[in-house]
Amino acid sequence: MTIRYTHPASASGDKIILIIGAGFAGLNAAKVLANQPGVQVILIDKKNHHVFQPLLYQVATAALNPSDVAMTIRSQFTRSERVAVHWGIVTAVNLDEKYVTASDTSLALETHIEVHYDYLIVACGVQHSYFGHAEWEPFAPGLKTIEHATEIRRRYLAAFERAENIPDPAEREPYLTFVVVGGGPTGVELAGAMAEISKTVIVNDFRHIDPSQARVLLIEAGPRVLPAFAEELSKKAERDLCALGVEVLTSTRVDQVGPEGVSAGGRLIPSHCVVWAAGVEAAKLNLTPTPQRDRAGRILVGPSLSLPDYPNVFVVGDMAAVEASPGQVVPGVAPAAIQEGRSAARNIINLLGAKPVERFRYRDKGTMATIGKKRAVVESGKIKLAGVIAWFAWLVIHILFLVGFKNRIAVLLQWIWSYLFSKRGARLITDENWQTAGAAAKPGSQAK
Amino acid sequence: MTIRYTHPASASGDKIILIIGAGFAGLNAAKVLANQPGVQVILIDKKNHHVFQPLLYQVATAALNPSDVAMTIRSQFTRSERVAVHWGIVTAVNLDEKYVTASDTSLALETHIEVHYDYLIVACGVQHSYFGHAEWEPFAPGLKTIEHATEIRRRYLAAFERAENIPDPAEREPYLTFVVVGGGPTGVELAGAMAEISKTVIVNDFRHIDPSQARVLLIEAGPRVLPAFAEELSKKAERDLCALGVEVLTSTRVDQVGPEGVSAGGRLIPSHCVVWAAGVEAAKLNLTPTPQRDRAGRILVGPSLSLPDYPNVFVVGDMAAVEASPGQVVPGVAPAAIQEGRSAARNIINLLGAKPVERFRYRDKGTMATIGKKRAVVESGKIKLAGVIAWFAWLVIHILFLVGFKNRIAVLLQWIWSYLFSKRGARLITDENWQTAGAAAKPGSQAK
């Protein structure tokens, strides 16, 4: 069944701007358009919340609460009557007839809602890529959503609890071995935090095991961690990781991930907590006609971020393949997504005013990664920082970012508080199964 | 397979005190025993965290984070080397041979760990009772655990999101109808909070629905809400609920709960968010020989809280049927559980010192319930309060309680902060399914 959705404001003659995805790109596009006269914005996302991804690893390692790094999308537009937020999954996009079909996760999946648009912004982001081994996912979750983060937290904390219950030290070992696959910023930050917590926060909480003896391995296929950074910073990061006790295995390829652990470089590393931070690919989205995509699945766009032949359709954020300079694609980082989202929104305003569109220009703000709680590496243009100074720069930049993100100094103070003092706050292991009996219908099925 | 677990300290000749359950009763028993020379305490719980149940309804209604009302059990005993905390499920208790078998939720369920004890404290609490209709549970979760609270939060928030996606007002109605079954303190607090939030926090966040038009129904089988309170307070609570817009249906029996909603008093109330707060029964625990239980499944204990014929075994908290005065059973409330846990612990110390055991004496501190954010009813001895004064009393008492609970003024301030200012903080809808593909193995299965 298809319900044709008529936006209540379409009778007013306003133009409908549909945005798919409320990550950094889509959210910022909507904010630029929020108070624009003559437009109605419809923002669709498959979650009810926007995630501040750069701090997601802190949820995965129990330092912050999920709600510290996420906010409901609609709460950002309470006072923007021109923006309607919908929780739904876009199932198809018809570029020629200018409509999208979406389904509510709850309503029967055969019910599709049809939404027509005048302008479209596609900003669905990326998902993990297991290089053709989707069957590895259950054994090595990635870190893109709040659900991923709480699942990794659950496995990380549960591993220590389980080890405490096992009398035989040899049998314990796979529970006290943690493997992070992928040496980019996420992998480095996760491995560093995991090693640090086992040696500080929880070190005195167990009676039969010594959490500080837990092994954390970081596996990277390339010759060095943080390959996007200058070589000297990679070396410093690797040294800092080693100082925290992380075993860094570079030039090591993962051959297999399964219930027993990870096979890499010809040997099995037994582990019951493996995290995947090794690669991403653009989100799947059923567009007709099919646009051209690059090897990573990113959609090729023109210099103004619009689709070739569809000047009213923009693709932004990690999902777009945009050239920063000839042969150089804009990296998939938050500042780039924000800039692209804003540029696309401004271009729609230009088109509405019959003005020429602007060419997207990427302003590279640099890149950074923390290693544990007091060290980081920062690279911005010719500036290269490492150690405590870099960590302080990381902190200040993330605080400034969060101020804009949460829009409230109050929440910011709370965050600083929990980050600096309350590392113990979020150490809950919760189960996906809330039912006493356990056997009956799955939660959520009530709404079908 | 059974692993015989030998406590590392048992060689020392210390007495082993095993406590099952880390609710208010078990946790407080462990605290009394924590630094007692000559004993080793083993505390087993099926969760890794203790829950401050009186505030759980605030998690269910998105006012507080799970970690605001829960703390990891082992973090309470970091400096108590005599206390070992284990995350496990007790599968059987052999009273004559003085051992317990437990299994780790993660390890294969056929692996049982055998733990011998000298003294045993049983404190497993209660679970929801669906009066013989366990099949209602998927459609009407109760509120006893963090998982319950986040599931109710998910359904409550998702209902508004889904209603926003439905163009037809008649089809929307079941999504904007919330039913709470049971008019005790939990039911009253849940219904009041649900009604209040729909009229305040989220009221301006939607474009197609008016959240303030949502219906909240409270169904109670007896003639009045809060039956444990004085009749005048019941009336005041009912009036306060009505002022918040809650429809209170007393003397109304629920006949059926299903995917369509609730059948009560001969009519169907279509609803996709039903919460069960109607009754509890003692937790199941496989004890051999089987002790005597009352109608609610509570285990009958003697005046010193020990099992008849087993002076080394104590049953405390909601699971125990203890007489406060002839014919009057101690109610299942947190202060009673705390008092019982401490009394049992002191009696074990008495037994170890060859002193006579004390008779348990319940000091009734009274009872209270909030209605919305600014009203409450309080009854303590001859004192009866209602309205804003009662709410203030409720606030002070819960703050004092939390000081002892979290042990840190810092965390207390954070709680006051989020309670007073950040109602929007915890409005995340997260799914139990973290996998991208969705089809593969269930999370957690990796560890089996």
Image (tube, coloured by chain):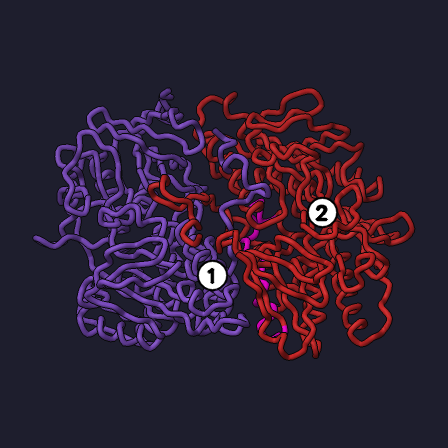
Chain colours: A purple, B red
Looking at the picture, how far across and down is residue A336, in whole percent? 24, 53
Q: Indicate whether A239 appears above or below A332.
A: below
Q: Report the disc number at residue B282.
A: 2
Secondary structure beneath disc 2? strand
Does residue A423 show up magenta in the picture?
no
Q: Quadrant of residue B310?
A: bottom right
Q: Chain of mark 1?
A: A
Camera-nearest residue between A401 and A417: A417
Which quadrant of the structure image shows residue A191?
bottom left
Residue A218 position by quadrant: bottom left
Q: Residue at x 20, y 34 (%)?
A: A312
Q: Is residue B339 left or right of residue A279?
A: right
Q: Position of residue A232 (x, y in %)?
A: 19, 74
* Residue that sits furthest to the right in the current view: B326
Instruction: State left or right for residue A279 relative to residue B361.
Output: left
Stretch in magenta: B58-82
Q: Amino acid at mark 2?
A: Ala
**On the image, numbered disc 1 is attached to which residue?**
A157
What's the residue type where badge 1 is placed?
Leu
| Residue sitting at x 71%, y 68% | B118
**Residue A180 marker:** none
Residue A38 visible in this rendered orientation of the protein: no
Q: Nearer the viewer, mark 1 or mark 2?
A: 2
- Asked if residue B91 is positioned above or below residue A91 in the image, the reply reads below
